[in-house]
Amino acid sequence: MFVWWQLIQLICFDDGTTMADIHYTDPNGPMYYNGVYHLFYQYNPHSALFGYGMLWARSASYDLINWFSLDHALVPSEPFDALGSKPGNPENRSDPLLIEWSKYSRNPLMTPPNGVDGDNFRDPTTAWQGPDGTWKVVIGSYSNKRGTDILYRSEDFVNWTMHPETLYLALETDMWECLDFFPVSINSTNGVDTSVTNPSVRHVMKEKFLPDVDFKGTNSDLRIDYGKFYPSNTFFDGKKNRRVLWAWVNESDSSEDDIQKGWSGLQVYIYGKHLESGSVFEVSGITASQVDTEIIFELPELEEAEFMDTSLVDPQLICDRQDSSVTGKYGPFGLLALATICAVSRKGWSSLRNNLDKTTYGAFVDIDPHQEMVSLRTLIDHLIIGSFGGKGRTCITARVYPKLAINNEAHLFAFNNGTLSVTI
Ligand SMILES: *[C@@H]1O[C@H](CO)[C@@H](O)[C@H](O)[C@H]1NC(C)=O
Ligand SMILES: *[C@@H]1O[C@H](CO)[C@@H](O)[C@H](O)[C@H]1NC(C)=O
Ligand SMILES: *[C@@H]1O[C@H](CO)[C@@H](O)[C@H](O)[C@H]1NC(C)=O
Ligand SMILES: *[C@@H]1O[C@H](CO)[C@@H](O)[C@H](O)[C@H]1NC(C)=O
Ligand SMILES: *[C@@H]1O[C@H](CO)[C@@H](O)[C@H](O)[C@H]1NC(C)=O
């Protein structure tokens, strides 16, 4: 389990010299240990923007939904991390919260090879142990105008040797950020730990794109998330036997706004209610600014729904052109989140604030027509909405900037603007 952290100890060359990338808060070091989920992230205590003095801040959770902050894990103090590199190891492994961290004195253990700029040597994958017992790790890079990876190998996790070959090299890409390499099971829905290698797994390398399925390069193709979803990272969650993919929800407003609000970047569950055509009802008795809801819409007359050739239409475009007031047979129906009472009757329901990226997101979700239902899990947390359709087959993450629907002023509604009724 600590493989990951020892790795961070080795790779700390995010030296803060790139001032152009201002909102740099990739989720790093996500892991599950002794009943606790940990998230580490780069944090600038002096500014809402990326800059010198970045440190490793962190939060912890018992369920991945409710989080609490812990003291910073690692703060620059040594020559080797003066520019913001943050190496470290947990002091007390019996402590599930891993409060205390120390730095390894022989840092840095890896330096950029010749021809690779320090800025272009970062974002390691989780290390894995090969069948030969040695450890391997891949680091994102850029050299000779190509995005690439650098593969390292070690017997003891301290002395690392660079492998002369790369796993993959791509023309016309930028620096490979947040590279990821991990196994997925081909005959089970369980996640697998990073070092598993056997005939029942296939490896995924996030930067290498060889689709197993038909891929058209259009908006109807399968994506991890159809909304706001930036540098992702994965970890194996041994508690639930799954691989959790985690991303950074960057901002949609301007740097000036970030400076004013003082921060930027966010990390990321009624029964039997009949919703007649044209109805809307408030989900009350909750704190609508922070909600975890799973809603199942029953569609008993599914065969009545309009036919649409999903290979010919772009779901995002449809959702953008036809807002939720345009009536179909089944739907539009759904949740109206972070709404104010007066805003319910407004046509179009994006934020009242100006100067924001107000992209409308849309995606298809595969459902079993025999089950005649579609589920939608929605997590609302003041400024962010995560939606998981069909048990996570389709995900849309949205960054929101409510002007009025703040704290107690926020409301949650379920609505149905289709001609057929649905039951939730
Ligand atoms: C390590 O953590 C455990 C569990 O929190 C605690 O009981 C123990 O006292 C800690 N050991 C030290 C040396 O701090
Ligand atoms: C590091 O590992 C390499 C390759 O296994 C080996 O040749 C070298 O002697 C090792 N260096 C140290 C300091 O252990
Ligand atoms: C998956 O395949 C592997 C190797 O072919 C086999 O050992 C394993 O039992 C299979 N697992 C399931 C859940 O079918
Ligand atoms: C935010 O992320 C999007 C991708 O979702 C990217 O195109 C955009 O440049 C990012 N904006 C900032 C300010 O980092
Ligand atoms: C439902 O349709 C009505 C009438 O077109 C519209 O005023 C209302 O805003 C729509 N509801 C939602 C949630 O979009």
Image (tube, rainbow, N blue to C red):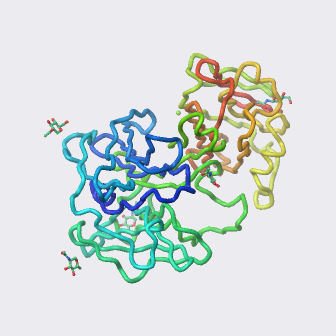
Residue 1 visible to the viewer:
no
Q: Indicate which quadrant contains ligand 2.
A: bottom left
Camera-nearest residue between 138 and 300: 138
In the rendered image, residue 12, in percent from the top left (x then y), is placed at: 36, 60
Camera-nearest residue between 87 and 397: 87
**From what the image shows, is residue 314 above or below residue 322?**
below
In the rendered image, residue 109, in percent from the top left (x then y), is placed at: 28, 67
Q: Residue at x 46, y 55 (%)?
A: 233
- What is the residue that sits farthest to the bottom in this orientation? 164
Side of 302 relative to 328 (left or right): left
Q: Residue at x 62, y 57 (%)?
A: 223
Residue 286 visible to the viewer:
yes
**From what the image shows, is residue 21 above or below residue 385?**
below
Q: Which quadrant would the N terminus be assigned to in this image? A: bottom left
In the rendered image, residue 309, in percent from the top left (x then y), is placed at: 80, 57
Number of marks in the rendered image? 0
Q: Which quadrant would the C terminus be assigned to in this image? A: top right
Q: Residue at x 28, y 72 (%)?
A: 160
Camera-nearest residue between 120 and 192: 120
Side of 248 relative to 81 (left or right): right
In which image quadrant can residue 416 be found?
top right
In the rendered image, residue 367, in percent from the top left (x then y), is placed at: 65, 48
